[in-house]
Amino acid sequence: MDTAAVIATFLVALLHLWFLVLEMFLWAKPYGRRVFGLTEEFAKSSRSLAANQGLYNGFLAAGLLWSLSIDDEYGADITTFFLGCVIVAGIFGGLTAKRKILLVQALPGAIALVLVWLANYS
């Protein structure tokens, strides 16, 4: 995979690690409530749901980082799979929760995916 595709994929993985931190550890804290626009009551009552969501974001990050460590003909395919998961999750979140998720999650995933495709399948 070329450098641009690796960097873009790595940045998407870092974003998802940050989402893990926000959702698992900062959700009910003042910073997390401010980021997500939550009341203290709602944040406390939905903390376990947010932690579950954060864990899934961590799995996406782990998959992306793992895919970057695979230096054979399957690495790009695995990267494509995980970036596809990121994009689908971002589109779903953008349609069901907040439109901003399309820009914060789906768009970076799509950019990285285009770079991976250009580097490996064109």
Image (cartoon, grey):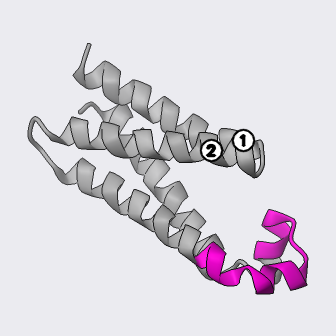
Check if residue 67 falls in the magenta segment.
no
The amino acid pointed to by label 2 is Phe
**Magenta span:** 32-51
Could you tell me which quadrant the C terminus lies in? top left
Q: Which residue is mark 1?
A: 95
Please name whichever residue, 102 or 6, is drawn nearer the observer in this view of the structure.
102
Read off the residue under disc 2: 92
Judged left or right of residue 21, residue 1 is: left
Q: Looking at the figure, which quarter contains the N terminus?
A: top left
Residue type, label 1: Leu
What residue lies at 32% left-to-right and 37% top-to-bottom?
A: 80
Q: Position of residue 98 (x, y in %)?
A: 78, 49
Residue at 48% across, 65% down: 56
* C-alpha distance separating marks 2 and 1: 5 Å
- Residue 106: % across, % down: 58, 39
CB within 8 Å, label 2 to label 1: yes
Q: Using the rendered image of the protein, determine whether residue 29 is visible from the camera's viewpoint.
A: no
